[in-house]
Each structure stands twice: as C-alpha cells, then as structure tokens.
Amino acid sequence: MNLERQILIIENVCRFWERSRNRLQVKGPKKEIAIIFRPLFLLYQNEVEFYKTKEIMKTQVISYNYNRKQVKTGILHIGVGNFHRAHEEFYTNLLLDDSTQQDWGICSAMLLPSDEHLYKALKKQNNEYTLTVCGRNGKDEVYRIGSLVELIWAIENPEAVIAKIADNSTRIITLTITEGGYNIEKSTGEFMLEDENINYDLTHPQTPKTTFGFIAEGLRRRRAAGNGPITILSCDNLQHNGNTAKKAFTTFIQAQDAELATWVAENVTFPNSMVDRITPATRPDDIVRLNTQNGTTDEAPVYCEDFIQWVIEDNFIAGRPAWEKVGVEFTQDVTAYENMKLSLLNASHQLLSYPSFLSGYRKVDDAMHDERIARFVRTFMDVDITPYVPAPGDTDLNLYKQTLIERFGNRSVSDQVARLCFDGVSKFPVYIMPNLIKMIRDHKDLSRLTYLFATYRHYLKYKVDDKGTAFDIAEPWMSTDDKTLIKSDDPIDFLALSPFQSTDLKAANDFVKQYLLMVEAVKEKGAMSVLENILS
C-alpha cells in the first residue's frame, strides 16, 4: 500500500473520530467504538501530520524537460560506472533540454560479466536513475537523469556493441575504463600485447572480449561501410588521457590490422581531457538511505559532491555536443588545467594522507575538520605550490584552493584516508616530485615536504599508527629493491626509492638535513606533535 493510500485511510478514521468524540451525542455501538478507539484515533491523527511533514521534507527531484523519444544517440560510452553517471551523463542530461542538441543522447555499453546487476537494474527503470548532488552546505539536489537513452550488455548482445560503433550516427566514443584498463606497462609506457585477452582479440577479431577488440572490429565495419570519422574521448582520471588512449588503441590496431591502422590515423582523434568530481561507490545501505531521503524507488542511484569540472581539448573530427552551454570548458591544451589539479588537489591529498593516517584518522573529512590538518594543507597550497602553478584560463586560483579545502571536508561524500595512502610509489613521481625539484632549486622552505617524506617512511616501515593500531600497506607497484630500502635502519636509504629517482635527493643537503630531523621527531613524538611544531 502506497503512502498516499495510507494517509487517506488514516484521515477517514480521524474524521470518524471527530464526528464521534462528543460521547453525549453518540448512541448505540458507535459510542463504545468511539470510547475504545479514541487513543488509537489520536495516534493516527498524529501519524497523518508526521507523514505529511515527512513528505514535505523529502528532497524534491529535479526532472529533465526533454522528450526522451525525440533524443537520438550520437555518443557511445564504454564503462558505465558511478563516475560516468555523475559526470558525463549529468552534463549531457542538462544539455538535452536544448532542442538543438538532441542528437547527442548516450548509448552505454557494458562489457563485463560483473556488470549484470547494474544492467538489469537500469533496464528495469528504462535506463533512468537519480543523482543526488551533496552540497558542502549540507543541502542536496536530486536530478532525474534521462540522457542514457540506450543500454547494451555485451555478454548478452556483443554484436549490438560492434554495430553501434560502426553506425554513422555514432560520432563520439567516450571511455571510463580506469587507468589499468588501458593496458599500459608503467615502467616502459608501452601497450602490453602479451596479455591473454589481448592475444585472443588479436586472433579472433569478430568475437572480441576487450574494449580494444570491440572498438577495432566496430571501426573496421565503419570503414567498410564508409560511415566516416569518429572521436575517442577518454574520461578517465589520468594525466594526458587522450595520449594514453591513442597509444593503446593504435598499438592494438596496428598489431591486428595494418590497413585499419592507416585509416584510424586519418579518421580518429583522441582529445585529452581533465575530469573532476568525487563520486563514492554506492553501497546497499546508501541505496536505502537515498531512496528514503528522496522519496524514490531507484535500484541504481548515484550520489556525488557538488563540485564538477570537465576541461576538454577541442579536437573532435566528427562534431561534438555544445557542452560549453552547461559548463564544460574547451581549450586547445589541457596541460595547464592538469598541472593545477595535480599540484593542488592530488598533491594535497598526498600531503595529508600519511600524517592523518598515522594520527588515527580514517576518513578524509574527519581529518580535514581537524583545524591543524586543514591549516597545514592550505599553507602547503599557498606557500609551497602556488608559485609554480599559473592559473589556467579564467580560473580564480584562490577560489579553487578554498573550494578544495571545502571539498575535502564535505561530510556527505566522505573519502577513505587509506585510499589516499594507496600506491604512493605511483603517486609521488607525478604529484610531488616535479614541484619539490623546483623548491629545492629555489631554496624554498622544505619543512612540509620533508615531513611528508618522513611520515611516508614511517607508514611503510613500522605499519603501526600513533595510537598503536597495526595496519597493512597497499603498494602494488613497489619493487623488491624498494622493499629492501624501506627495511633499512638508515633513513638516507629511503631517499633512493624508485618513485624519487627523478632527482638525487641525497645530494640536496638542506632537504636531507630537515628530513633526518623529521624522521627522528615522528618516531619519538608522533605525527601530530611534529605537525603542531611545523605550524607554530
């Protein structure tokens, strides 16, 4: 029984009580009924008011204004995760309200057996879902997303995926397949042709298993049909993602079909892009919470932070949506935007990760609500990093930094400190080392970064936080040599780790001197005590 029906019944019962409450005017059996059930009627009356109030308090769902039946698909997306549904779909859903942009609906393809649950949940809902945007001020906005107008599961219908790539109405293929999905060897930067599934696809082009195999076969049919050029746009959170995608796909296609590789070189573009929006995984209890809060029955809801950014290199060979109408930034070079994000957002995450974890914090928002950590991070941004980060375009750098502090502390989209600590070997060379080298060259204050190195060593070597809680580390790319250096009791050996080899830290006297003091202080006094000294 739905809530409206329950309220109607309760209201009718209450009206009966109102008519019967004057017992002097009630005769016969009705009088006894009125007396016996009076407490229950009063309770029901309160329940009516409660449910009415609850209905008013529910977050109002903002629906789209376009007719989905009139929307055509111009984009094929591969990799339908939460981030895609909170980012590209969000922008496109807004854009489709513009009647001139309704050739740019999205068809999404799921390639993995593990996609079955989400596929069935979305199909049951006609591919619609709700997106709850969690404000830093504690207020949420809920959107009904309708831009996902077609959905294909390759396990069920692989031919439909290939046909969609070949279709002349498909002019852009977007990807969120994760950094590992590009199959690039970290140490060499080369595409790994020896992978088992890659080998299968190279020799079985008509029955592919991987993203590369599906796209290659679709492009082969597209070329044969004369259906023209197409753009492949990576939306994954990695530096120079378009260059990475180009490397991966062109290497695979060259190994499989040299003639197709020649066609791709002339008819496929791979723009770089920078994406940003914190989007947590949706757990079963989140689904219950979101549906209760929003008054919905969505089996596949998503929630995310209220910040969003997408900067794209304007290199589309077959046309593109006018995403700039809804806030996407187009540029000829995304490098400056990437540098800003890597140097301020990602480096700040790295800076707060190990000190926070050693101090006992497990959630980023909890750590950032510690005034000492928040001040430490903001000082790092202002003093250490800002001199090396030119503001791209019309970006207000002070506003961007303040927004980062607020985002890190957003209670509604809590992130795990352990995730920030994960795989430091891969993160230090990209997020920390480039600006550290400049700071050493310019004889800058190195206290905050030497503290970071000292806490990273302590985290890796001792595996116990300052409260005595043991933990496991997760460093999937750490070499055997690195592990040996970490075990050494000489802190200088730690500076020879592979992620630091873009410079000779042991030769930087000022850095070494401060680092050794930090190592000893963190061991003797604890991470937070040392942080307080840095701030004083």
Image: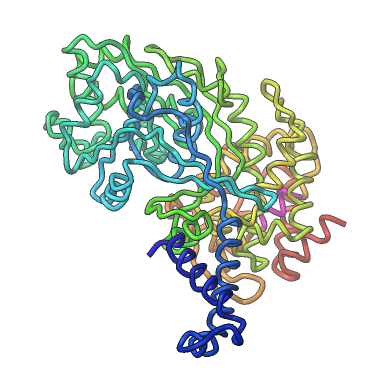
Where 536 falls versus 308 (above or below)?
below
Q: Can you give x and y, in whole percent of width and height, for residue 88 in the image?
A: 46, 33
Residue 398 in view of the camera: yes
Would residue 483 be counted in the magenta stretch?
no
Name the quadrant containing residue 416: bottom right
Display coloring = rainbow
Name the quadrant containing residue 123: top left
Name the quadrant containing residue 176: top left
Report whether 70 appears left or right of 365: left
Nearest the camera: 328 or 32? 32
Q: Can you give x and y, in whole percent of width and height, for residue 41 in the image?
A: 54, 79
Q: Residue at x 81, y 43 (%)?
A: 445
Q: Residue at x 51, y 49 (%)?
A: 303
Where 59 falls versus 200 (above or below)?
below
The N terminus appears in which quarter of the rendering? bottom left
Q: Can you give x and y, in whole percent of width and height, for residue 370 in the image?
A: 74, 61
Report whether 125 appears left or right of 425: left
The residue at the far right in this view is 536
- In the image, the segment drawn in magenta is 448-454
Q: Residue at x 51, y 30 (%)?
A: 94
Nearest the camera: 150 or 500? 150
Residue 510 in view of the camera: no
Number of numbered discs overlaid on the protein picture: 0
Q: Can you give x and y, in whole percent of width and height, for residue 485 in the image?
A: 53, 57
Report whether 6 appears left or right of 20: left
Q: Residue at x 78, y 58 (%)?
A: 372
Would residue 450 be counted in the magenta stretch?
yes
The C terminus appears in which quarter of the rendering? bottom right
Q: Main secondary structure of the magenta part?
A: helix
Nearest the camera: 28 or 314? 28
